[in-house]
Amino acid sequence: MRSQKSATSAVLPDGVRGCVELIMGQIDDLQMRIQTIEKAIRVQLRASEVGQRLKTIPDIGVITASALTATIGDIKAFKSGQHLTAWIGLVPRQSGSGGKVHMGKISKKGDAYLRKLLVLGATAVIRNCRNEPERAGWINALLQRRPPLVVTIAVANKMARIA
């Protein structure tokens, strides 16, 4: 730490150094606040039976599990996992005419925060599956047939249905 201060003082003028130290202090304070909030989230998740069950699902972490329990509330409001994924907005839009149905991009009509968490989690799953082919053969088979972003949405959809 001492070498950083001496390097900083050698490069930065006194007025600028004071501003940088002030900003660094604010960053440290925010990091402590974030840690406090994360601890509170973990405590609430441990106390929740639904949260405990969600944490047992592979690739759903503490943040996603807590967001699902907080946002959804009573899971019995949905008839099935497909209704939940439609509510989140992880299903393709359907349009058609003359009896033909065309599938489009995802609807994005639901909760953007949950959708983002599930998509980020699915991205991590896909990245790990490329390194561990024995873990998820169906993801790798899907990657051979479809573009990576389509596979990411499919994995996020599956994670939401499992949840």
Image (cartoon, grey):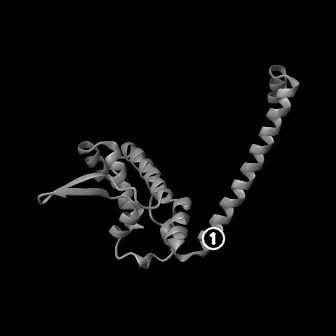
Depth order, front residue of 133/77: 77
Depth order, front residue of 88/59: 88
User: Which residue extends farthest right?
Assistant: 14
Are there few (<14), some (14-19), or many (20+) residues within 10 Å of tag 1?
Answer: few
Q: Is residue 116 above or below residue 51?
A: above
Q: How many numbered tags mark residues here?
A: 1
Q: Is residue 80 left or right of residue 31?
A: left
Q: Residue 108, percent across and down?
A: 39, 56
Q: Residue 132, percent across and down?
A: 38, 46
Name which residue lies at 48% across and 77% down: 74
User: Which residue extends farthest top?
Assistant: 10
Label 1, secondary structure: give it.
helix
Quarter occupied by the C terminus: bottom left
Residue 71 appearing in the image: yes
Q: Is residue 74 above or below residue 161?
A: below
Residue 115 lies in quadrant: bottom left
What residue did someone put label 1 on?
Answer: 44
Name which residue lies at 45% across and 64% down: 57
Quarter occupied by the N terminus: top right
Name which residue lies at 77% across and 49% down: 29
Name which residue lies at 41% across and 44% down: 127
Q: Residue 87, percent across and down?
A: 40, 66
Q: Is residue 112 above or below residue 126?
A: below
Depth order, front residue of 139/30: 30
Residue 1 appearing in the image: no
Q: Amino acid at mark 1?
A: Gln
User: Which residue extends farthest bottom?
Assistant: 76
Q: Is residue 68 left or right of residue 92?
A: right
Q: Residue 26, percent across and down?
A: 78, 44
User: Which residue extends farthest left?
Assistant: 98
